[in-house]
Amino acid sequence: MHLRGHASFKEAVLRLRTLCFVIVIFQVTDGSAKYDFLLWPNNTVPYSFSSIMRNDTADRKMVLTSMQIISRMTGNCVKFVQRTTEPDYLYITKGAHCLSYTGRTGGKQAFPVQRACLNEYGSIQHELMHTLGFYHENQRPDRDKYIQIIWSNIKPEGFNNFAIRHEMETYGLPYDYYSVTHYNPFNEFAVDKSKPTMIPNVNGTRLGQNENLSSLDVAKIHQRYKCGVAAASYFTGDDTVNENSSLKDTPRTSIALPVALGTLIPIAAAVVVALCCLRLKNHRQGHSTMRKARWRPHSFVKSGALHDLSSVHANLIMNDPALKGHVSLLEISLAKVVISNNLLGKGATGIVWRGTADGVYGHPGKVDVAVKSARKKYDTGQIRQLLQEMKVMTQAGRHLNIVNLLGVVTKGDVVLLLEYAQFGSLLMYLQSYSTEHVYNHVDENGNILPYDEDKAECIEQLLLVNDPCWAEHGLSPPFLSSKALLSFVYQISRGMEYLGTKSIIHRDLAARNVLICDRSVVKISDFGMAQVGTDDTPFDPKEALPVRWMPPEAITSRIFSHKSDVWSFGVTMWETFSLGKIPYGGSDIMRRPISEFVISLRNGLRLERPVFCPIAIYGWMSRCWGCLPDDRPDFAELTQALRLVIDGDSAETYLLLDDVYNQFNMNYLTMLEHATMDGSVSLH
């Protein structure tokens, strides 16, 4: 290595020593700090049981014992405690599926468990590991070195559970063929359950899901939650809960060795790389700074003016007079936006965080917002898509039943500030309720019975007594009713009718893309696929589409219309009245080629009427699934029909709530006209 002079040599040595120290610190944490927002504070997970779980002693005991197993096997590295006043907590209830978010999401976090999950401690621990922030072991970025996925034997709805997660940490640990988070090869997602969905690359390797935490599972928890003591040192022969645990026969040093190797080997390699890097020129430091900024996905570059965007982004705004006018009206300084570590959701190209903004028009003081940005801030395609979504939302204006755009940030980064929906997606909201929590006033023949206020009040009081946390948070009523489900679909239809008046085709309407807010107001969200006006250009064949929600003509042509949105609305209605079940989930049709699914739809395959759905509503639902687009009603007709079914007071309430949005749209259009002419008008 050639070093120019004594001063340069000393500087190089100092830089190398500093770099080694940074590498050591980074390796101790294994870089997991970039996902610290998913961790539970103080390594403690508060939980609360629903009333139905409280009343089922055996099922509740299974969950509590599973929590105890994790705490004991990790030496109380992580703890599960009954919730008192903690704002973030698990709400454990019975559901149609075993579902869990990956990591802490914030607020009341649904944790529905199915009967099948309550038969084995390992199944519950599997879901609890997700809650602690871990993906499936078979989703590791390096998994292809160890196992082979048999995609042909996996149902389409299971693909996501086997997809590689590049953001997943390995913590320098070996591949765990028998992790509690590893799928058994013969699992529920197999098309043919007699054949495996994955096989090990080395013959004779045992592969499957352990019945309790494996030794490497314990090590991962210690790494992620920074407990620092070798995981196996906490194991004692007195533990009666880990009879089948692979930890039982593991030497106490078996954890420390892979962890140490996983730490020391990268350090040694990094030192060698660092020595070579000293020969690079100083301009590389700027790129290093950029990489460091990416470790915090919720941080944003607070730089300069509009021209600080790349020329592509700037031209997209500056060359579109309407978009330029909207930006001048809605622009908010990033300094007035506080972005929390509370991840609300993420997709292939976008990511959404909870935050607050000051100076939003029509909202004095700070207001809760959902902050949406591109997943990769320097990806031109993702920024372009985000700006296109902004353009669609500004075209829509504001309405009670759509998620409204409150502000934008375009100086430096591109960020959308959206209305915050405190109860999350309608899909997860519905799935968090079991059938025992539904006041069903639809008889077995599908006739709507009168809504009995006295009976509803009795049910509400009973649930409040059994589960007082609802009252603490003012969530009333703590149950669903047929009346509430009717209100949800009526509001969705209103939102879609409004979008139709603005010539907007949503193209991805589903319960997962409908959010629920305070006072049971629902809002249509996620305009990432939406388009303004009719576009005969088909979707890219490589792009995945929501086939279960699409009509036959859209599946084959990949072209959407207002009438394809109507079909999707019918499926969304079905999801609502089935409490969030998967469309066609009980049929084997989705295991076959999509062409066969299309043929089946054209031959009359339709979803059956859910128990909670009135027969009259199912009639309209079925009309939404007319094989030809012209056979389907429009949203104006649907809204009117649904309005006649729900009670008059509710319908009148929504009309009154519309007033504030109508007034905003009138004022906004006037200001937009001036802003488009001279660019000098602002809402602020």
Image (spheres, rainbow, N blue to C red):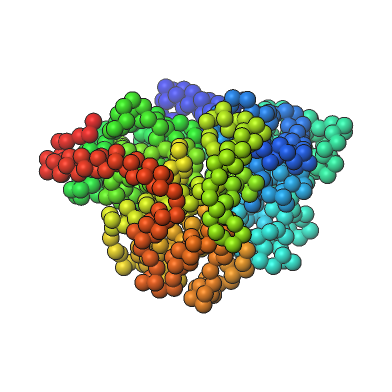
Q: Give the image location of residue 614, x and y in percent.
A: 53, 58
- Horizontal arrangement in the rendering, residue 296 relative to residue 656 (left or right): right
Q: Give the image location of residue 636, x and y in percent.
A: 34, 59
Relative depth, front residue between 256 and 231? 231
Relative depth, front residue between 99 and 141? 99
Q: Is residue 50 visible?
A: yes
Rendered-image quadrant of the C terminus: top left
**Hey, which quadrant is residue 189 in on the image?**
bottom right
Report the number of discs: 0
Identity of the residue drawn at 43% across and 42% down: 521
Relative depth, front residue between 37 and 562? 562
Q: Give the image location of residue 608, x and y in percent.
A: 57, 65
Identity of the residue drawn at 36% across and 38% down: 417
Identity of the residue drawn at 30% across and 64% down: 535
Q: Give the image location of residue 311, x and y in percent.
A: 25, 46
Q: Is residue 69 above or below residue 549?
A: above
